[in-house]
Image (cartoon, grey):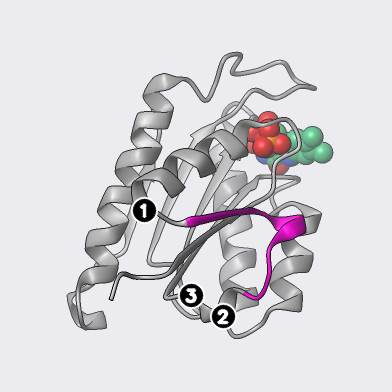
């Protein structure tokens, strides 16, 4: 049976949506904005996508995760817009998520995204970023397909 995979994302200005679409395409996954997403627990894998907002997942994504405890296998990706601090803020957001869910993600991906307030990273995510996102999905399928946890190594990736 094919794996049932959900990509659930939040996006205010479209950056995370673009990455979510690329990841969902490579995973052949259901794709849902967080406001329309149902119960994630029927899925073999849930991929969570959010902008980094004040070093946390977005408020809507935090609410969704709090309202749906007991997630199984999951992976996560973030877009971020702050130079220098951005990757650190993503690590903090991931730490919040891991504490909330109570387990580590199978894989993570982060990508620069145009920050409408700071006006940094104009044009990102670009085509190369979306290819990286697509390939992240491809590798994720390989990780999930491995049978035992002992064979699974966690993957951390980022766009350039
Ligand atoms: C209120 C707010 C808080 C943000 N906080 C951070 C942050 O802590 N670190 C960071 O790198 N970018 C931060 N950003 C920038 C966004 O994470 C970034 O631009 C992201 O790609 C936006 O995604 P979206 O287009 O899917 O909404 C923030 C943006 C907003 C509007």
Q: Secondary structure at mark 2?
A: helix
Q: CA distance from mark 1 to mark 2?
A: 18 Å
Instruction: Give the image quarter of residue 124.
Output: top right
Q: Secondary structure at mark 3?
A: loop
Provide the residue designation for mark 3. 43
User: Who's the residue at 80% across and 22% down the image?
Assistant: 117
Instruction: Give the image quarter of residue 99.
Output: bottom right
The magenta stretch is 30-39
Query: Tag 2 or tag 1, which sits nearer the N-term?
Result: 1
Instruction: Name the residue nearer the viewer: 20 or 148.
Output: 20
Q: Are marks 3 and 2 in contact (CB under 8 Å)?
A: yes
Provide the residue designation for mark 1. 27
Q: Secondary structure at mark 1?
A: helix
Provide the residue designation for mark 2. 41
**Where is the N terminus found, in terms of image quarters?**
bottom left
The residue carrying pointer 2 sits among few (fewer than 14), some (14 to 19) or many (20 or more) residues within 10 Å by Cα, namely some
Locate residue 143, reporting x and y percent. 25, 65
Q: CA distance from mark 3 to mark 2?
A: 5 Å
Residue 64 shows in the view: yes
Q: Quadrant of ligand 1?
A: top right
Magenta region includes residue 35: yes
**Where is the C terminus found, in terms of image quarters?**
top left
């Amino acid at each position: 049976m094919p794996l049932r995979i959900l990509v659930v994302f939040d996006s205010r200005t479209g950056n995370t949506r673009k990455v979510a679409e690329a990841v969902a395409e490579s995973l052949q996954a259901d794709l849902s904005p967080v406001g329309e997403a149902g119960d994630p627990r029927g899925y073999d894998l849930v991929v969570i996508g959010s902008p980094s907002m004040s070093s946390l997942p977005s408020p809507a994504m935090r609410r969704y995760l709090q309202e749906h405890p007991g997630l199984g296998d999951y992976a996560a990706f973030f877009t971020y817009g702050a130079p220098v601090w951005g990757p650190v803020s993503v690590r903090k957001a991931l730490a919040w998520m891991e504490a909330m869910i109570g387990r580590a993600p199978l894989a993570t991906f982060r990508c620069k995204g145009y920050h409408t307030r700071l006006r940094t990273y104009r044009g990102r995510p670009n085509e190369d970023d979306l290819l990286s996102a697509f390939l992240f999905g491809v590798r994720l399928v390989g990780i999930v397909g491995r049978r035992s946890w002992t064979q699974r190594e966690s993957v951390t990736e980022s766009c350039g």
